[in-house]
Amino acid sequence: MPVSSFILQTIKQLRIMRNYKNNVCGSAVICRSITEVYCVDKNYQGDVIIPMGATDIVNHAFKDCGGIKSVVIPNTVTRIGEEAFMGCSGIKSIVIPDSVTDMGINAFSECSSLESMVFSKSITKVPKDACSFCEKLESVVLPDGVKKIGTFAFYECTNLKSIGIPDSVEVIGEQAFYGCKGLTSIEIPDCVKKILPNAFNGCDNITEIHLRHKKPMGKFSKSFDELDLAQITLFVPIASEDDYRNHPFYSKFGNIVGE
């Protein structure tokens, strides 16, 4: 008789094996009392339910498992390893539970069907290449508490339409949003101290930039300098307009408006 799910009671590692013709692995995998999760068959087809009690989705755990349609991550997981879901082209949405405090580089890069993502409220850094080349990604929720958005974090997410940068962010990494052509407006809170080169270059459809800094930050210039600044309206704090209009870089914007 085909089995659609199975339970393992006492193992310390879960290996998701081949989806054999008798469907012994089925479309859902449910296990108890494990600490690490990874897949050893890149041809696995179906949904993955990571069991309560698992704490570590190891490096490369589901890399290039294009047949996975959805993943449920329980609130016992504290770590998602490097390239854990890289190339999982069938996944459309991800919710990372607040138990996760550590996420490795390239964790969700090249997930070509991924449309939405909610990050854990417990992370303080969006890692390098976290979601790079997720060309269908439309929306991302970043929690308060994130201090750094890493290099290439959302590189070439060409369909990204909105990104909320929380008031805790201090650093936006090099090319973090490069090529995000779906963005039309961005807001940068005044807590941001560094925006590294090319962070927003290649975002060719931006028409509005909202800067909350009372004084012009000249070191931000290489983050936007490839954009057609004459076609962009820059919104700045009221009473700061003249400082921005007289600045050698910000004076290139088509319009500067206080708000």
Image: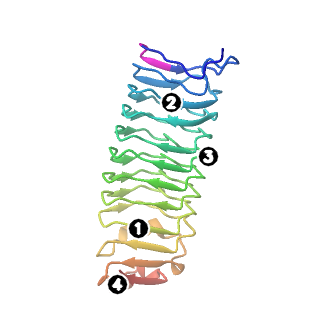
Q: Within the magenta stretch, is there residue 23?
A: no
* Quadrant of the snapshot with the C terminus: bottom left
Q: Which residue is mark 1?
A: 187
Observer-nearest of 224 and 51: 51
Q: Residue at x 57, y 47 (%)?
A: 114
Q: CA distance from mark 3 to mark 4?
A: 41 Å
Report the number of numbered marks: 4
> Left of 204 or right of it: where is 100?
left
Q: Is residue 230 visible?
A: yes
- In which image quadrant can residue 204 be found? bottom right
Mark 4 or 2: in front is 2
Mark 2 or 3: in front is 2
Q: Which residue is mark 4?
A: 241
- First reached walking from the N terminus: tag 1 or tag 2: 2
Q: Please state the horizontal and vertical placement of residue 192, each as a whole percent of the image.
A: 33, 62
Q: CA distance from mark 3 to mark 1?
A: 26 Å
Mark number, residue 112: 3
Observer-nearest of 18 and 5: 5
Q: Which residue is mark 2?
A: 49
Q: Main secondary structure of the magenta part?
A: loop
> Left of 227 or right of it: where is 171?
left
| Amino acid at pointer 1 | Glu
Q: CA distance from mark 2 to mark 3?
A: 21 Å
Observer-nearest of 203 and 219: 203
Q: Secondary structure at mark 2?
A: strand
Q: Which residues are magenta?
A: 10-14
Q: Residue at x 32, y 58 (%)?
A: 170
* Quadrant of the snapshot with the N terminus: top right
> Left of 91 or right of it: where is 119?
left
Q: CA distance from mark 4 to mark 2?
A: 53 Å
